[in-house]
Every structure is written in structure tokens, then in C-alpha cells.
Image (cartoon, helix red, strand yellow):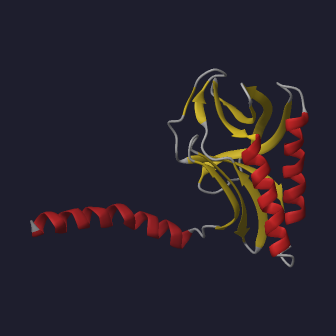
Amino acid sequence: MYRNIKLAFSLLLIMVLPLFSFAQNHKLPNRLEIVEVENDEEDVQIEVFALLRDGQKSYYLSVGDLGVGNKVVQLHIDPIFELFIPLGNTLDEAQENLEKMKTMFKQSKGDTMQVTGCLDLAFPGENLETVTITYTRFMLTHMLEFSVQREGYLRATHITRSQFKSLVTSLKLYRKLHPKEV
């Protein structure tokens, strides 16, 4: 039994060692959560966070993981990659960009807006691509669909109006509680 535990620990150490080596050679950016909204029923998590890279702070919106499929069917089989949308370098810019997205709820069903974003692992990368935001309704639910076209497939997620309004309200409250943060 002791031999099996020792073997399992050795294998785990061998698997984790490259991660420690990577972290020492490549400085990972520091991701600071500002506000987060979760919905357990739909398993959707959206957040606004600050990213510190080389002393420069940038704000991003993460709309969580995207499904894979087409306009009708989306399968959520990729829980690792997140869709990140740059919001700016200050909280003012971040709030302003969220307010622009929030105006989509006053548009006609099917209206779209395009922004830049990236689908990446844990942190936003440098490869920006076009993200389409579409205002949709399903029965009584108002939603924004965030989608990216990839290799003939549509990768998308939906954020309800109440979730998005809660995110914007939480950001405003955060700004009131932290007035000195730029």
C-alpha cells in the first residue's frame, strides 16, 4: 500500500513539475475580480475583472465558457476556455462599455453589435477576434447572445437581462466603495 501511495505521489509530482517551471519562466498576469454574477439554474458565470500585466491595469468582461454548435443547438462541452471582452484601462471606460452593451436590450429582436474579444484559457491573450452580440428573446426572457464563428461552428453563450443589469449595478456599487481606484 505504501508503495502505491509513493508511486501515485511521484506521478503527480512529475505531472505538476512542468507547470511550476512554466510559472517561473513566464510571469502569469494577476487577475483581480471586481464583480461577479452567477446563475445556478443556467450555470452561467459572468465577471468583470482587472488584469495586471507589467504594471499596466486593464479591465475585461468574461462571459464564461461557450457552447459549440449552431444557431439552434449549443453543447457546453468546453468548460476550460472563456470569452474575454476588453473594457478599457479605467473603471470609467469599463462602465461606459458595459452601458453600451446594456443598450442592446432596448433594440429590436435580432439586432447585433460587434466588439473585439478573445476566446482563451484563464487569461485574455493577444489574438483578438470579432465577437457578435445579438439581442434575443425566448418566451419572456430577454438575453444577449455572445458568439464567435469558429471553423464552421458557432460558439455562443447567453446572458439574461437580469444578470447583465446586476453586473452593471454591482460595478457601479464597486466604484462608489472604491472611489480612488483608477
Q: Residue at x 68, y 47 (%)?
A: 63
16 left or right of 139 in image: left
Q: Residue at x 56, y 47 (%)?
A: 40
Quadrant of residue 102 within the rendered picture: top right
6 left or right of 94 in image: left
Between 29 and 170, the one nearer to me in the picture: 170
Locate the N terminus and report the quarter of the image it occupies.
bottom left
Residue 6: where, in percent of width, then height? 18, 69
- How many labels were placed on the picture? 0
Q: Indicate whether 104 appears above or below 140.
A: below
Q: Is residue 128 shown to the viewer in this render?
A: no
Quadrant of residue 43 within the rendered picture: top right
Q: Residue at x 52, y 69 (%)?
A: 23
Residue 50: where, in percent of width, then height? 73, 65
45 left or right of 171 in image: left
Q: Residue at x 76, y 38 (%)?
A: 131
